[in-house]
C-alpha cells in the first residue's frame, strides 16, 4: 500500500512540472486538444484515535487510514469543439474504497467507459481470535455504445464481481423434540460473477425497438463448510455455481391519431442451469471445490438442475383529452422448475428411504404470477386533480404450495389551493386471499416441523400517504410528510399476526441572504409486530402429533421499533469568491422494545458532524480544511451479553465469544482532521 502511494506522489510531481511552466496553471494545449482537470491531495489526522477494536462501526464500509491522502484526480482531454473527449477520474487510490474511471467518446458516434472500484463490509472487530471479520468486494465494469446512424445504437456491457472474506452465520445444533439451540460461526465466501449484456436499439419517432441478450456466470470456490464444529456431520452447503441466460425483446409504438396512445410490449425468456457436484460430507474442515474428491467429502454426483422463466408485459397510456390520462397494463411471469424427480437431489438430502421426500416440493415448485392494472388521472382544473387505480394480482404455485389473489384499489388527490401550497394525499386498500399457508406433509419424520409459509397467507393492508409543500416566502421552503400502514394476517394460527407502523417528517430550508443557505429536517418512524410462536416453557406441538412448531419464546411476541433522525446543514460564503464554510450534522437514534422482562430495550445512537472551510487562493489553487466528528453508542447490557456469549440454554457463560460474530460494535468517539490542496488546470 505504501509503495502504491509513493508511486502516485512521483506521478503527480512529474505531471505538474509542465503545468507550472505554462503560466501558473493555465490549460495545456496539445495540438488540436486541450488538457484540463483538477487534483485534491493532502493528509488525514486523528485526534484521540479510537483503537482497532472500537473502530468497527466507524469503518464498516469505508476505511479511514491516517497520513497522506490523494482525495481525487480529474483529467479531461477534449478537441476544439468538445465533440471528442477522453476523461480519467481517480478517487482515494491505494485505499479500500478506491475508484478508477476512464471514459472516451465522440458525440453521435461512440462512448466507452471502464471502471474499477472496491467496497468493504466490516462485520466485527471485537472477536478475540479473528482480528477483522469482513468481506471485500471488487468490481470491474465496461460499457460500450456505438451509434452508426442516428436511429441505431449498439451496446455491450460487462461486469466482473469478486467477493472474498468471511461473514457471520448461524446454524441449528439442536432441534425437536428438544428445545432449539443455535451456534454462530464464520461462513467463508470466495466467488466470482461475470455478467455480460449485448443489445441493439432502433428508434423512430413513431416506434422504437430493442433486442438484448444477457449472460451471467456465478462461480463459487467453496461448496460447503463445517457449520457445527462439534459434529463431523454438521456441514452446511454454500451458494452453488450456476449459469443464467436471458433474451429480451421490447417494442413501443406511438399512435397520436388514436387518442394520443402509446403502447409498449416487453418479452423476456430465460434459462437457468446448475451442475455443481453434490457431496455427502463427513469431514471436519473446510475444503475448496478443487480439493481432491474422497478425502473429506463423498461425491453423490452432479446436481444437474435447471429452470426456465418467461416474462411478458403489455402496457398502454392513452390521453383522449388534456384533462384525462388512462393507464392499463398486463404482466405475467412464469417460472418452470422441473427438478422434483432429480435422483441425486433426492438421495443426497432425503436419503434412500425418502421419508421426508414430500418436503422437497416446498423447495422445487413452479408458479405463474399475473397482474392487471387500470388507472386514470383526471384534472378538474388547475387546482384539483384525482388519480384512481386498481390492481389485481394472482400467484398460482404447483403442488398445492399456496395460491394467492390480491385486489388493490387506490385513490390519490392533488390539490393546489394557492401558489404557495401543494397538497397530495393517497390511500390504498389491499386484500390478499391465500391457501395452504400451514402445512405438514405426510409421510414425514416424527421430528419434522410444521411449515409456515407467510407468502401464501391472508393479508389485509391499509396504506395512507400525505405530503404538503409550502413556499410562504421567496426564500423559505417547507415540506412535511406522513405515512401510515397496517397489515393484518387473518386466519393465521401461527406466525406473523400483524404488522403496523407510521412515519412522519418535516424539512425546512431558508436563504436569508445571498451567500447563506440553511436547512433543517426531522424524521420519525415507528413499527410494531405481533407474532404467535413457540412457548419456551412448554413446547407447542401440533394437535395429535409430536411435531413441534419452530419458533422463539412466547407464545405471543410483541416488538416495537422506533427510529428518529435529525439533520442540519449550513452553507455560508464568508468572503465572496474567496472563503466559504460548509457544515452538516445528523443525529439518529433507535429503540427496540421486545416486551420481555429478560430483554431490556436495545438503544443505539449515531452522531455525525462534517465541517469544511475552503479558501480560494486564486482561480487555480484552493485550500480545504475539514473536521469530522462521529460518536456511536449502544445499550451496555447488550454489549456485555455479546462479549460473554450464551450457552445452548440461553444462560450467559464466561469466556464464550461466539456471539461477537454477529455484527456487534463497540461504542466509540472519533475526531478526524483532513487538509487538502486543490489545483485546477
Image (tube, rainbow, N blue to C red):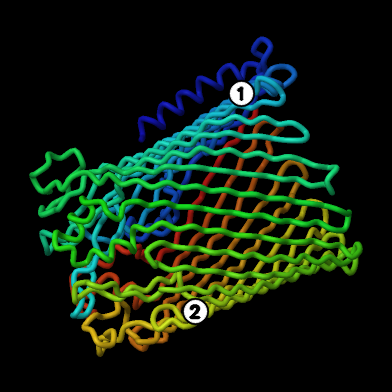
Residue at 25% across / 89% down in the picture? 537
* Residue 227 on image: x %, y %: 20, 59
Q: Nearer the viewer, residue 650 or 192?
A: 192
Residue at 31% across / 50% down in the picture? 239
* Residue 247 on image: x %, y %: 51, 37
* Residue 275 on image: x %, y %: 28, 42
Q: In the displayed structure, would residue 405 be above or below residue 627?
A: below
Label 2 or label 1, whichever comes before in sequence order: 1
The residue at which mark 1 appears reads as 146
Q: In the displayed structure, would residue 658 be above or below residue 555?
A: above
Q: Nearer the viewer, residue 454 or 15?
A: 454
The residue at which mark 2 appears reads as 489
Residue at 84% across / 49% down in the picture? 259
Q: In the displayed structure, would residue 143 be above or below residue 457?
A: above
The quarter in which the N terminus is drawn is: top left
With 409 as the anchor, is 229 left or right in this view?
Answer: left
Looking at the image, which residue sits at the far top?
Answer: 31
Amino acid at each position: 500500500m505504501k509503495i502504491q502511494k509513493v508511486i502516485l506522489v512521483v506521478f503527480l510531481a512529474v505531471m505538474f512540472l509542465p503545468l507550472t511552466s505554462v503560466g501558473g496553471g493555465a490549460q495545456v494545449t496539445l495540438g488540436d486538444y486541450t488538457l484540463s482537470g483538477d487534483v485534491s491531495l493532502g493528509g488525514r489526522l486523528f485526534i484521540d484515535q479510537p483503537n482497532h477494536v472500537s473502530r468497527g462501526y466507524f469503518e464498516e464500509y469505508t476505511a479511514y487510514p491516517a497520513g497522506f491522502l490523494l482525495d481525487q484526480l480529474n483529467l479531461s482531454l477534449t478537441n476544439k469543439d468538445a465533440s471528442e473527449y477522453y476523461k480519467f477520474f481517480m478517487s482515494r487510490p491505494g485505499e479500500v474504497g478506491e475508484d478508477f474511471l476512464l471514459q472516451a467518446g465522440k458525440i453521435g458516434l461512440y462512448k466507452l467507459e471502464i471502471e474499477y472500484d472496491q467496497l468493504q463490509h466490516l462485520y466485527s472487530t471485537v472477536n478475540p481470535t479473528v482480528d477483522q471479520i469482513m468481506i471485500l468486494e471488487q468490481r470491474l465494469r465496461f460499457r460500450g455504445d456505438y451509434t452508426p446512424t442516428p436511429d441505431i445504437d449498439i451496446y455491450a456491457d460487462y461486469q466482473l464481481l469478486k467477493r472474498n472474506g468471511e461473514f457471520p452465520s448461524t446454524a441449528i445444533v439442536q432441534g425437536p423434540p428438544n428445545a432449539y439451540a443455535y451456534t454462530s460461526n464464520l461462513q467463508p465466501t470466495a466467488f466470482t460473477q461475470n455478467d455480460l449484456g449485448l443489445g441493439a436499439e432502433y428508434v423512430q419517432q413513431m416506434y422504437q425497438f430493442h433486442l438484448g441478450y444477457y449472460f451471467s456466470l456465478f462461480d463459487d470456490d467453496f461448496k460447503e463448510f463445517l457449520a457445527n464444529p462439534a459434529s463431523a456431520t454438521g456441514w452446511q452447503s454454500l451458494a452453488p455455481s450456476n449459469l443464467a441466460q436471458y433474451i429480451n425483446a421490447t417494442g413501443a409504438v406511438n399512435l397520436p391519431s388514436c387518442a394520443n396512445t402509446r403502447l409498449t410490449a416487453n418479452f423476456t425468456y430465460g434459462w437457468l442451469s446448475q451442475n455443481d457436484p453434490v457431496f455427502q460430507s463427513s469431514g471436519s474442515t473446510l475444503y475448496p471445490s478443487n480439493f481432491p474428491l474422497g478425502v473429506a467429502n463423498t461425491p453423490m454426483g452432479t446436481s444437474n438442475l435447471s429452470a426456465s422463466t418467461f416474462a411478458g408485459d403489455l402496457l398502454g397510456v392513452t390521453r383522449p383529452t388534456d384533462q384525462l390520462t388512462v393507464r392499463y397494463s398486463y404482466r405475467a411471469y412464469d417460472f418452470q422448475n422441473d427438478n422434483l424427480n432429480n435422483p441425486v437431489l433426492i438421495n443426497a438430502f432425503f436419503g434412500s428411504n425418502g421419508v421426508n421426500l414430500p418436503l422437497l416440493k416446498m423447495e422445487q415448485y413452479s408458479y405463474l404470477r399475473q397482474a392487471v392494472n387500470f388507472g386514470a388521472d383526471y384534472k378538474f382544473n388547475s387546482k384539483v386533480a384525482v388519480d384512481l387505480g386498481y390492481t389485481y394480482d394472482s400467484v398460482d404455485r404447483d403442488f398445492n404450495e399456496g395460491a394467492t389473489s390480491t385486489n388493490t384499489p387506490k385513490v390519490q388527490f392533488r390539490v393546489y389551493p394557492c401558489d404557495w401550497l401543494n397538497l397530495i394525499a393517497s390511500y390504498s386498500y389491499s386484500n390478499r386471499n391465500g391457501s395452504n399457508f400451514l402445512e405438514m406433509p405426510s409421510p414425514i419424520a416424527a421430528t419434522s416441523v410444521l411449515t409456515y409459509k407467510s407468502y401464501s397467507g391472508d393479508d389485509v393492508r391499509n396504506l395512507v400517504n400525505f405530503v404538503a409543500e409550502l413556499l410562504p416566502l421567496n426564500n423559505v421552503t417547507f415540506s412535511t410528510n406522513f405515512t401510515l400502514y397496517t397489515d393484518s394476517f387473518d386466519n393465521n394460527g401461527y406466525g406473523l399476526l400483524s404488522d403496523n407502523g407510521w412515519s412522519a417528517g418535516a424539512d425546512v430550508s431558508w436563504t436569508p441572504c445571498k451567500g447563506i443557505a440553511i436547512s433543517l429536517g426531522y424524521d420519525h418512524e415507528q413499527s410494531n409486530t405481533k407474532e404467535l410462536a413457540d412457548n419456551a416453557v412448554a413446547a407447542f406441538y401440533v394437535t395429535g402429533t409430536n411435531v413441534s412448531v419452530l419458533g422463539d419464546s412466547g407464545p405471543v411476541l410483541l416488538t416495537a421499533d422506533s427510529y428518529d433522525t435529525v439533520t442540519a446543514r449550513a452553507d455560508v460564503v464568508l468572503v465572496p469568491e474567496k472563503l466559504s464554510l460548509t457544515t452538516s450534522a445528523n443525529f439518529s437514534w433507535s429503540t427496540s422494545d421486545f416486551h420481555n422482562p429478560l430483554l431490556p430495550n436495545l438503544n443505539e445512537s449515531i452522531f455525525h458532524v462534517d465541517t469544511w472551510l475552503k479558501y480560494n487562493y486564486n482561480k487555480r489553487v484552493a485550500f480545504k480544511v475539514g473536521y469530522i466528528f462521529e460518536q456511536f453508542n449502544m445499550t451496555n447490557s447488550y454489549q456485555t451479553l455479546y462479549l460473554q456469549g450464551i450457552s445452548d440454554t440461553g444462560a450467559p457463560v464466561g469466556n464464550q465469544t461466539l456471539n461477537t460474530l454477529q455484527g456487534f460494535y463497540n461504542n466509540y468517539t472519533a475526531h478526524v482532521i483532513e487538509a487538502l490542496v486543490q489545483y485546477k488546470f
